[in-house]
Image (cartoon, grey):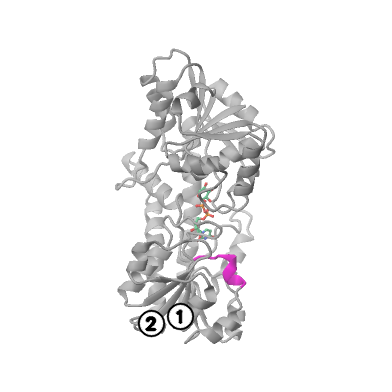
């Protein structure tokens, strides 16, 4: 198939590279020239394991190309995927500016029948609206067949997820769009679910909202565990063995971040409210998530009544491991709170470069974790990078001033750390 992907962000780039890998002829379009220039050279402009190599291979064999010329791109393709961003507005609703612009662009340059697939996460009714926007901005009389095909890939394992999805959802009332997508995904062995466009839109929001709920739920239970000396890890394990609950997304910690959960929970809550069905459970999920950094800093203050002048080494800046994405990363509210308390912060992250804004606030960055921990009064883990599991903690113990270790991701073995004479604290007893 000849496929055009509009929007070379995280989802668009991964999807394009994977379609090319599966033998399709792919063009990636973006209005951002710098992204296109970089991708044309085979340089992935974000960190995602394995994707760089696959991009390079597909460029070499000519199955993927990149352009910033919308006219030629739209004219020369029959199957168009929309993967532009839908960030949050002040009121929590999704900002549909990029989707609308992309739809109008398709309308403007449309010269024949097109299949338009919305892959961006969009609120209920947007896919039908995309069809309208295309109709209103075109003079071409031929049909447009629309579908909604949500993407469930995770950052850090985007390539694996795109190659091994656990389900494919095709939302469309249109038989041509449906059969084209069924054909496109025919080599996948996972369940394929055909729904209406609105159901597909809702599946994506409800899935992300549910996963976020699992995280906030376990974080609340972890706080209870702190009060009654019960290990949250035991509780999560015991719960997760029940197949109806499942073991995933029960890792207590500093809460969820990233480009999806915070924004999708907000949008789902806002749109439900405007439809007169407030999803109060999600309002609480968000509140709990926002309170996690405060809870943890207060926990630290139980050990250190004042953090003023204390050297805190913060390990991890990205919102999760294996990505350089810092959107809604909890490390930043943590740093804000620590600075307010008068702490001196040194950070380490394997890939994220701290911006000058933070450097001018007095935060220092070290690329060597052993240099970062030197003379520190306490270490705080904000991201569960595997690098921190592999640290020589006995050596770290020798380098610090006082061996206080606050593990905001419950990633280290508490017993082992205590044997190494660390004052180890996680979230949920430990
Ligand atoms: C998520 C969804 O998983 C994916 O299906 C969707 O397409 C996009 O949003 P992503 O944001 O890449 O993916 O990361 P994910 O691995 O889901 O983690 C999100 C956040 O939750 C991270 O900050 C992570 O640290 C946190 N998390 C996750 C927990 O705190 N506890 C857990 O048990 C799991």
Residue 358 appears at what percent x and percent y?
36, 65
Query: Foreground: 214 or 304?
Result: 304
* Disc 1 residue: CB within 8 Å of ligand 1: no
* Residue annotated with mark 1: 378
Instruction: Please report contact status of discs 1 and 2: CB closer than 8 Å, yes or no.
Output: yes
Would you call the spot at circle 1 few (<14 residues within 10 Å), some (14-19), or many (20 or more)?
A: many
Q: Is residue 73 above or below residue 112?
A: below
Q: Position of residue 292 (x, y in %)?
A: 41, 66
Helix or strand or loop: what does disc 1 sit on?
strand
Q: Residue 304: x, y in percent?
A: 39, 83
388 is within the stretch colored magenta: yes
Instruction: Identify which residue is drawn at 35% across, 36% down.
Output: 97
Q: Quadrant of the C terminus?
A: bottom right
Viewer-nearest residue: 129 or 216: 129
Q: How many numbered circles are shown?
A: 2
Work out whether 291 lies above or below 204: below
Query: Disc 2 marks which residue?
Result: 310
Find the residue positioned furthest to the top.
141
Quarter of the image for the N terminus: give it. Answer: top right
Q: Which residues are magenta?
A: 383-390
Give the alpha-carbon distance from disc 1 to disc 2, as whole Å.
Answer: 8 Å
Residue shown at 35%/77% (left/top)? 343
Say which residue appears at 41% left-offset and 77% top-offset. Answer: 299
Label 2 CB, ligand 1: below 8 Å? no
Name which residue lies at 49% across and 50% down. Answer: 210
Front residue of 275 and 205? 205
Q: Element type at marker 2?
A: loop
Q: Position of residue 220 (x, y in %)?
A: 45, 65
- Relative placement, left or right, of 387 versus 293 is right
Is residue 69 left or right of 2 when viewed as pictured?
left
């Amino acid at each position: 198939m000849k496929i055009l992907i509009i929007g070379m962000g995280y989802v668009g780039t991964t999807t394009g590279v994977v379609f090319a890998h599966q033998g399709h002829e792919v063009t990636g379009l973006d209005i951002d020239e710098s992204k296109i220039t970089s991708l044309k050279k085979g340089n992935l402009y974000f960190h995602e394991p394995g994707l760089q190599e696959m991009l390079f291979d597909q460029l070499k064999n000519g199955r993927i190309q990149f352009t910033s010329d919308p006219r030629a791109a739209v004219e020369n393709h029959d199957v168009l995927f929309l993967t532009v961003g839908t960030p949050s507005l002040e009121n929590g609703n999704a900002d549909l500016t990029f989707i609308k612009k992309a739809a109008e662009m398709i309308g403007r340059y449309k010269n024949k029948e097109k299949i338009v697939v919305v892959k961006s996460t969009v609120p209920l009714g947007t896919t039908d609206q995309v069809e309208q926007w295309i109709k209103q901005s075109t003079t071409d009389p031929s049909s447009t067949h629309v579908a909604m095909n949500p993407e469930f890939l995770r950052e850090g394992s985007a390539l694996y997820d795109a190659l091994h999805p656990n389900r494919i959802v095709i939302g469309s009332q249109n038989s041509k769009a449906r059969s084209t997508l069924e054909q496109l995904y025919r080599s996948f062995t996972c369940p394929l679910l055909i729904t209406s466009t609105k159901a597909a839109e809702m599946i994506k929001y409800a899935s992300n909202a549910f996963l976020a709920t699992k995280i906030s739920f376990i974080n609340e239970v972890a706080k209870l565990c702190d009060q009654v000396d019960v290990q949250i890890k035991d509780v999560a394990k015991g719960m997760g063995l029940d197949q109806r609950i499942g073991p995933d997304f029960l890792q207590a910690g500093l809460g969820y971040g990233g480009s999806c959960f915070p924004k999708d929970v907000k949008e789902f809550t806002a749109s439900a409210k405007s439809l007169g069905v407030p999803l109060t459970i999600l309002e609480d999920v968000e509140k709990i998530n926002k309170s996690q950094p405060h809870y943890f800093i207060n926990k630290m203050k139980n050990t250190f009544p004042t953090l003023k002048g204390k050297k805190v080494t913060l390990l991890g800046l990205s919102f999760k491991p294996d990505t350089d994405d810092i959107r809604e990363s909890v490390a930043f509210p943590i740093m804000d709170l620590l600075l307010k308390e008068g702490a001196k912060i040194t950070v380490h992250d394997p890939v994220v470069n701290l911006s000058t804004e933070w450097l001018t606030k007095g935060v220092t960055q070290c690329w060597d974790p052993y240099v970062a921990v030197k003379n520190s009064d306490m270490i705080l883990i904000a991201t569960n990078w595997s690098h921190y599991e592999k640290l020589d903690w006995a050596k770290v113990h020798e380098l610090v001033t006082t061996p206080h270790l606050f593990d905001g991701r419950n990633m280290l073995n508490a017993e082992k750390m205590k044997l190494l004479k660390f004052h180890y604290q996680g979230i949920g007893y430990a």
